[in-house]
Image: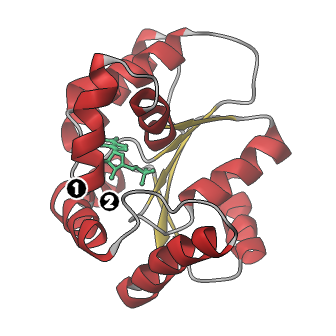
Amino acid sequence: MNIILLGPPGAGKGTQARRLVEERNMVQLSTGDMLRAARTSGTEMGRRVAEVMDRGELVTDEIVIGLIREQLLAGGEHGGFIFDGFPRTLAQADALGELLGEIGATLHHVIELQVNDDVLVERILGRAADSVAAGGQARADDNADSLRTRLLAYYKQTSPLVGYYYAKGNLKTVDGLASMDDVAQSIADAIG
Ligand code: AMP
């Protein structure tokens, strides 16, 4: 089973994806994680994406589609893919459909995690403060300026995917503001 977790930054996509990995042996494909790995690798691509990410803007479709393509073609035995933070544009959504077609797979469900924007902002800025309090480092893009840009990118470029997948008949909407366990249960109910 292949699913997309769709929702703005801070909606809980990563948390829920990690649960599905544990419970269903699925593979989490987070383009955000892949890009964070790329930026620390000292590669040319890493240098190019770091600046864009820190501003909170989207990196090019070409780069993220390339990353996803590599993972999809890697093969292996598992319970399916969870796309977390991908696709984020209509071009990426079209590309994903084509890539899945190439490997003979289909997209089963798109789960939209719906959240209130005020709560989102609190969550993300809280996540940054928690990391620092725990002696770690906050994500470079978890600050107020970058967050505003990330939210704008979501509403301008990614939110049209809600309509796109509704029209394709894949969309299920879940209340992302419920407790972590309740969100996990709603997702389980939605995907069966
Ligand atoms: P995330 O961890 O999903 O919040 O992603 C962190 C950052 O990585 C985003 O703000 C973008 O700069 C970049 N990014 C992640 N996924 C994508 C994507 N599918 N398309 C474009 N940029 C992305």
User: Which residue bears the numbered disc 2?
Assistant: 162
The number of discs equals 2
**Image height of 159 relative to 126, above or below:** above
Query: CA gap, disc 1 to disc 2?
Result: 24 Å
Which of label 1 and label 2 is nearer to you?
1
Residue labelled 1 has its Cβ within 8 Å of some atom of ligand 1? yes
Instruction: Answer with left or right where residue 173 lies relative to residue 130.
Output: left
**Image height of 73 relative to 34, above or below:** above
Residue at the image point whose x is 72% and y is 35% from the top: 26
Q: Quadrant of residue 156?
A: bottom left
Callout 1: few (<14), some (14-19), or many (20+) C-alpha neighbours within 10 Å?
Answer: some
Residue 135 drawn at (x, y percent) = 67, 66
Instruction: Answer with left or right where residue 14 lies relative to residue 41.
Output: right
**Image height of 153 relative to 169, above or below:** below
User: Which residue bears the numbered disc 1?
Assistant: 55
Q: Quadrant of residue 75?
A: top right
Q: What colouring method underlies this structural image?
A: secondary structure
